[in-house]
Amino acid sequence: MNDTQAYLTPQKFEELKKELEHLKTVRRREVAEALEYARSLGDLSENAEYQEARDMQATIEERIGHLEQVIKEAKIVAHDKKGDIVGLGSTVTIKKDGGKEERTYTIVGTEEANIHDHKLSYLSPLGEALMGKATGDAFNFDTPSGKQNYKVVKVA
């Protein structure tokens, strides 16, 4: 897989398109209004409101550029439900050797990764170790506290 390619689920692709539209329509207008107000206050060299609005404008424009690039180059992936091999879009349940607790993750692209939602990047150490594995496979990966050994309990 191409490491610079943005792999997205159809849901994330739509979410990013909505965010881009919101930034272009609503947020740009809000910042333009804030800039106009700040300009009306006078001396721009010592105007904190103006500087804050300019910084916000730069942040929004940077995000818009990033989203446009991601959307333009994104590869939409949907998990093949027939497969029992871990790939992008797979939901994988794993268990640490000697442990009782099972953990379930969905393998996603880097743009979509969020550990709090149990969405794991395929480029993360654990994600890389899981790619290509099947139910019952043992695997390990390196962490700051040393090598961790796990087993794939289920691939969905």
Image: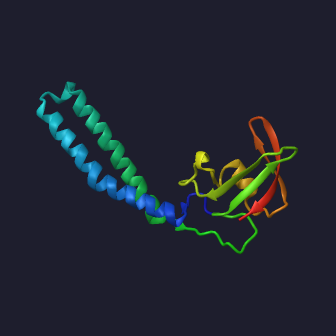
The quadrant of the rendering that contains the C terminus is bottom right
Q: Is residue 15 above or below residue 99?
A: below
Q: Is residue 147 left or right of residue 108?
A: right
Who is closer to the viewer here, 70 or 139?
139
Q: Position of residue 53 (x, y in %)?
A: 26, 37
> What residue is rendered at 88% in x and 44% in y?
98
Who is closer to the viewer here, 74 or 106?
106
Q: Position of residue 11 (x, y in %)?
A: 50, 63
Q: Position of residue 118 (x, y in %)?
A: 63, 50
Q: Farthest residue toward the top?
A: 46
Q: In the picture, residue 79 is in which quadrant?
A: bottom right
> What residue is rendered at 54% in x and 62% in y?
8
Q: Farthest residue toward the bottom?
A: 82
The quadrant of the rendering that contains the N terminus is bottom right
Q: Farthest residue toward the front?
A: 100
Q: Position of residue 155 (x, y in %)?
A: 74, 63
Q: Is residue 127 above or below residue 8?
A: above
How many numbered marks have been drawn onto this rendered protein structure? 0
Q: In the picture, residue 18 is in which quadrant?
A: bottom left
